[in-house]
Structure formats: C-alpha cells, structure tokens
Amino acid sequence: MSFSMEYPADRFPAFVDSIYERAEVGSEIGEDVNASSPKPPRRRRRRKKRRGQFREFVRFCFFCGPLYFFGQPLWEFGNARSSWAFEPQAQALLLDRDEAPLMSWPEYGDRRPVKFDQLPGEMVNAVLAREDQRFFVHPGFDPQAIVRAGIADVKERRIAQGGSTITMQLVERVYRFPQDRAINKFRAKAFELMMAPRIEWYAFREFGSREKAKQAILASYLSRVEYGYQTVGIREAAHCYFGKPVERLTLGESAYLAGLIRGPSVNNAYFNPDNARSARDAVIRNMRELEMIDKTEAKKASFYVASRPHRKSRKGDGFLSAGVRRELDGLVAEGRLQTDYAGEERLRVTTTFDPEVQDLARDSLIRQLKRIEKTRGFRVPGGQLQGAVVVVDNQSGAVLASVGGRDFDRLSYDCALQAKRTVASAGKPFLYAALMKSRKLSAFAQISNAPLRNFESPEFQGLRKPRETLALKQGLHPLWKGLAYSSNRMAMRAGDAAGFVSWSGLLQDVNLLDAPPAKHTSSWLGTFGVRPVDLAAAYSVFPRGGHYIEPYLVEKVHLKGRTVFQNRSRPKRVLPTSVCDEITASLREVVRQGTAAAHGGASFAKSLPVAGKTGTSDGVADTWFAGYSSSVTTVVWIGLPEGTQTILDDATGGSLAFPLWKMVMEGLPERYPFEGLADLEKGVREVALR
C-alpha cells in the first residue's frame, strides 16, 4: 500500500518556487497548465539561470572560502605537538647517553635550551620592554596589541606594527609555517593565534603554575632567537658578541641583544654600529618608561662589542660530530640504518657520551699538553703536540668520552678515532696473554731477560739485541715483572714461546690488527699501528673477564619521533677469565712499582684499584698509557700526528702519558665506582722458560 501527500499550489504557495514547479503541481491536480500559464521568454529564463548560478557561487564562497583559508592552518594545528616548543632548536640533534641535548648537528653549536634561572633580570626586562610588555598577563595572544597594530596599519596604509606576542613568535620559530605568499602570511598569523594558547596551556600543565609556564616559554623563545652573524640562541649570542656566559650579561649588553631581535643584521654592531646604538637606546627608553630601571641606571647603561666575533660557544666539539657521522655512514653501508637519514627533519641521535666525562677528558688533555710544552728541553714547535683520550664503559663497550685532539679547527683529523699510531710496549699485555693461554701459565712463570741468542726464532727477521731496561738484572724473572718493567728481551722470548699464530690471532680477535703482521722480531715489541679507541676496547677485555665488545658511539637513532636504529652489543669470548685475572694482577704492578710508579703511580695505586701499561715508541714520537678499573677503560696518547720528531729527551709513556691518564681516572669514581681487581697471589706453580 502506498501513501502520498499532495500540496495544492493555491493553499501552500511556499512549496512552489517557479512556474515550472507550479506546472508540475498543476498537472498533478488535473489543471491544464499550458492553457493558463504560457512559457516565459528566453531572455528572462537566462536571467533567472544566471541569478541561480550566482547564488550557488555565493553559497560555495560562504562555506568553502573559510575552509580554503583556514584548512592548512587547521591541518598543521592538528599535526603539531606542543612539546616541540620546548625542545632545542636544531634540525638534527646529538643527545648524550641520558638523552639530554648534547649539541646541534652537524654544526655542533651550543643549542642547549637556556633555563629561566640562568637569565639575568636585566635581560628578561629588556626583552619584555622590546617585544611584549604584557607577556605575563595575556593568554598567548594580546587583543590590545592586535587592535593597536590594526589601527596603526590602517593609518599608515601598510603593515607598520605587529601584534605578535612572545608566545606567537615562539610558535613562528618552532613550526615554521610557510610565508612565501601574501595569503600564506595571513594563514601563518591565524595558525599562531590558534597555537599560542595551546602552548600556554601545555606549559601550564607541564610546569605546574602560570608563572613557571610563562618563564619556560620565555626561556625557550630566547633559546631560538636569531641574533645575527649565524648565531642562534642567547647562549651563543652572549659568547659571540661579549665572550661571556649569559649569566654575566650587563644591562647595556642585554639591551643590545634585545634590540637585535627585530633586526639581526640591520641592528648589528659589526655592520651598522649607529643602528645598534639606536636600537639599544630604544630598549633602554622603554625600560625607563615602564619603570624597570631608574634614570641613573639608564644613563650608565652601555655595552662593548668585541672587535670581531668570538668563536661559537660549543657543547661537544667537531671531533664528536665527525665521529658520529662516520659511524652513521658505516651503519648505512652495513644496511643497519636507512640511507636517507641525512638532511631529515627532527633527527635525534642518542650517543654514548657522558658530558661530564667528556669535559674532564678534554680539560685534562689541554692542561697536560700545556705542561709538557713548558718543560725544559721541549723540542716541538708550539701547537704541534697533540693528544687523544678515549674512555670506554667496560660493561657495554660504549664510548663515554673521546677527545681527538686539542683543537678541531687546527687539526680536524681525529687522533682518537682515526689515527693509527705505533702502539709500542702498550701492546705487550696481549703478547703475554697469548703465552698464558697457549701454554697455560701464570703470572709467576719464569722468563729470562739474558741477551738473546742468534738461533732463537730462526724464521723471524730483524732485531736480535733490543734495547733493554736497566731495572731488571739479568736472569730469570716472573712474567709479571716483564710487564711491570717492560722488558723487551722477555717480551721477545714470550712471543717465541707463545707462537706467532697464537699471538697474531689474539690481536685480530680484539681488532688491533686486520691481518697478521710481518714475521719480524720488532712486531713483538709493538711496531704496528693502532687507533686509541681500538686499544681501549682491547684492554677492556681484561676487566670484562675475556669478552670483547666492539666500541660504538651511537646508541639509538630517532627520526620524526620513531626509533629507526637501536645498538645491540654482541660480546665475543677471546680469552679465558683466568688469563685476564693474571694479566690484570700483573698490570697492577706497572702502577705500583713499574714504569709508572715514579710518576705518581705508587701513591695512586694505594688509593684506587687500577691497572695499566705504558708505551713509548723509538724516538719518543708516540707515548701511551692504557689502563682500566673495574668499570671503565681509559687510553691516552700524546705525540706527533706527523713525523717522528722527539718530543722530549728521555721522555716515556710514564712521564708524559701517565699523568694525563691519572687526571682522567681520578675524576671518574664518583660516577663509575671502582671495585676490586685481581691481585698477585703467592704459591702459584712456576715454570721456567729459558
């Protein structure tokens, strides 16, 4: 059964919109429409059609126009994260092992966010007086400022003033809404108006109060402002223009930096000193009008800009930046990391570095190099002496600190991660370890240090009468003394007894050699080259109980909030634990009574359980000390990257490198506690090797 309802046109005219519809209705009720309602003229029909099209266009503009204008800002608003406003300003960022900002990358500038407590009151007031006087009052946008700017723009018939608040400027710098066209500029302003209150609300929830939220926003803003001369952030600006930390900025200096915000190049003292002075004075005048300072302070306000910019303030250095890039490239080549990481936005690389250990290692290296250069008899021209420090975590194999030289700008070749230098006697522990492993000997096994006979090691070529230490008399001595006093004759006999294959195989297992060295007697004395980072990883086998872990700098890689790489350590056993304990017990005697004892080792060994070995190349162009505690392994090298010129007459690894190693190790126990190490035990079976 069907049901329909009809509406007579004469009683319900509202339901009939045109004569054509009336015709349809009339035909339904039985009227002769063609007889009483003639068809209108063609011109009138066209006019009605055009009016209908115009009405449709108006409807389209009314509904779709706002969507066209606000669509992109709304889309960006939905995808944006408020937390981005409080992250460091950098496309790519290196994080330390605790995932705190270490430095921007690859420029390695100091992009750490400044904290509000670090800002002088004069700096805060100067910025507020210049940019946003009602900052602590408005909710992210300031209606008064917007109205005032609009009136000024109408009067001037141009954009004469801006109504942006500090929060809106922060949004502009964080989210980088495109402003390439006039309409996009209006869209960007709409996006800022929407996003600013959202940032304020996020900060309020994150920091617990309105005041702390405002302080965090202001600090984040000042950490992102461009101050000219390729300087970003208040930290770099204070260092670049005044050579001081931000905490020590004066009133005049603060006013100058506040004046740079609106015109980093126009108001720059290096290019336009008059403009810089005028902008500075305008800030001082505003502060005086707002009663932030009195008349006396305003008159005394002045600033001094260095005759040329200082170097960028850095957290980290170029050596770390380049080292991380090389490791990332290696991961790409191995297929463990996607190939398009370079140039990606929001790249975050979690490194293994500990900033406190890094700073300790760098400062100690510079201090020791300067001390050596002041020593009587120093032969090297100033600035050519270099050094390297590597600190490795024994548990994971992670590199906690790596200092590749004294100055990356002078020598960009990394002496810690790239340079292969003659290892000298620092390689002897692996010679004795190979002997103990192959012959199952202890540290008390006896070896002679008498002059070598011609028939020994007949398949080898080279030196038969190496220079010998005078600390040991000729005769039989335990293995540990051969290490403690670095006997060359005992080392060559140990190599002959261990066998070339056993020794060279161990060196390849711990990644000190890629291929077996030439069968030359000097190879046993360490004439091959190694990188400090590889030597540190090799030495960490002893406190780790015989397992080798390849050293690494990159822990994780985050790309746009997603983890695309996670390092997985793969331990490999290369030595028995018993052999490692014997070597450790022997190397403790190096510090107690051996080649490092006279240079502060004897007293140091009484306070902390440590072990290590010196190394000195012929000609004293390379000096080493490689050693460890239960938690960390540290290797230091001091020498000349190019050439074999003698550093100091009668210098050794004990006199040059060990004091540096000691300085670094003394600063580590609080963060990485030193536990007990294996010690020499009496009553071990003795075996004589004659």
Image (tube, rainbow, N blue to C red):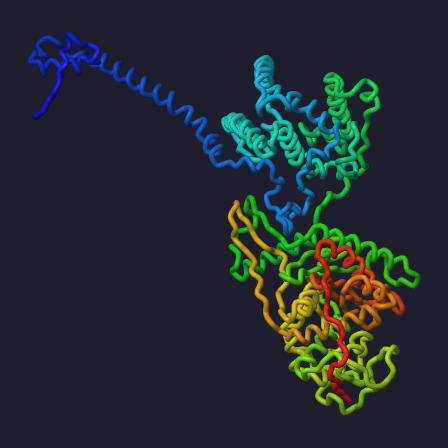
Q: Quadrant of residue 233?
A: top right
Q: Quadrant of residue 285?
A: top right
Extreme residue in the bottom direction? 455
Q: Residue at x 73, y 24 (%)?
A: 279
Q: Quadrant of residue 303?
A: top right
Counting from the top left corner in percent of width and height, residue 547 is at 62, 69
Task: Please state if 78 lies on the left or on the right of 556 as rendered.
Answer: left
Point out the image quarter for the C terminus.
bottom right
Q: Residue at x 53, y 33 (%)?
A: 178
- Out of 91 and 133, give the one closest to the viewer: 133
- Out of 613 and 565, give the one closest to the viewer: 613
Counting from the top left corner in percent of width and height, residue 544 is at 66, 67
Extreme residue in the right direction? 376
Task: Please state if 195 lies on the left or on the right of 532 as rendered.
Answer: left
Q: Is residue 105 above or below residue 510?
A: above
Extreme residue in the front direction? 683
Task: Please state if 115 lies on the left or on the right of 199 as rendered.
Answer: right
Counting from the top left corner in percent of width and height, residue 613 is at 77, 70
Counting from the top left corner in percent of width and height, residue 362 is at 76, 54
Q: Is residue 413 visible?
A: no
Q: Is residue 457 visible?
A: yes
How many numbered circles does the render carry?
A: 0
Point out the image quarter for the N terminus.
top left
- Out of 675 and 112, give the one closest to the viewer: 675
Q: Residue at x 54, y 35 (%)?
A: 82
Q: Residue at x 60, y 46 (%)?
A: 92
